[in-house]
Image (tube, grey):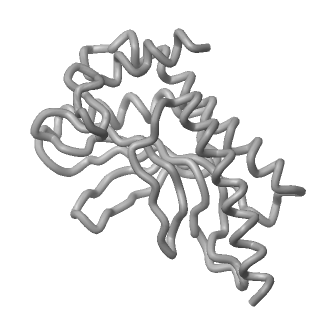
Amino acid sequence: MIEAEEIKERRRKIITQIRDYYTQRLGRYTHQRISEEWHFYGLGFVRDEMQYVFGFNAGFFRKQDVPGQAYSHAGVNVLVRTNGSNPQLRTQYLKFFRHQLANWITNQESNFSSFRGGVGVEFPRYKAISSFASDEDIVQYVKDGIDGIADLYHVIAKNPDGIFDNVVCMIAPWDESIIELAQKQIEKQ
């Protein structure tokens, strides 16, 4: 039992460092999720009646069962919802992220589904926890993934084809657009 508590405490320390860097580079996260499948910080975006359109997540994920470990991988992902209203625009988001993240992902893109009925594509940048030499290596790997998403803000701020019009963060007061967020984060760099 002590080993499980030690692992949990190590993970808590790592996720705290990830959270602080996430906020610095990407903006204030909109949610933290902890379950048997993941422990991550995420920033989700909605648009008009489309509800959730895409999000950026960083932390720990279960991609395979590893005895004695709650999660098997650490890293970052971008999720793009493909079902729901306005399928043409959802396809544009999918194409945008597929193109922009082609050299960023480390694993094949895959499908995801959520308990709320969302279906979409996951663009993963994960590495097996067992392959890291230290906790510091995990933190640095996740930070590198976050930097890759932060680099997207330069393209998002230009709003190619107007696809980021009316896209806002899923956090109160619900009026910060992704374009404003991207510009603000670029200025901080």
Q: Nearer the viewer, residue 123 or 146?
A: 146
User: Which residue does the image show at 40% across and 58% down from the upper left?
Assistant: 111
Name the quarter where the C terminus is drawn: top right
Q: Nearer the viewer, residue 175 or 113?
A: 175
96 lies above or below 126? above
158 lies above or below 9? above
Which image quarter: residue 165? top left
User: Which residue does the image show at 45% across and 60% down from the upper left?
Assistant: 33
Residue 133: % across, % down: 89, 57
Left or right: 53 as drawn, with respect to 103 = left
91 lies above or below 132? above
Residue 39: % across, % down: 54, 62
Residue 140: % across, % down: 76, 41
Name the quarter where the N terminus is drawn: bottom right
User: Which residue does the image show at 72% across and 83% down from the upper left?
Assistant: 68
Q: Count of labels shown? A: 0
User: Which residue does the image show at 75% across and 73% down from the upper left?
Assistant: 7
Left or right: 11 as drawn, with respect to 48 = right
In this view, the residue farthest toward the right is 133
Q: Nearer the viewer, residue 148 or 13?
A: 13
In this view, the residue farthest toward the bottom is 1
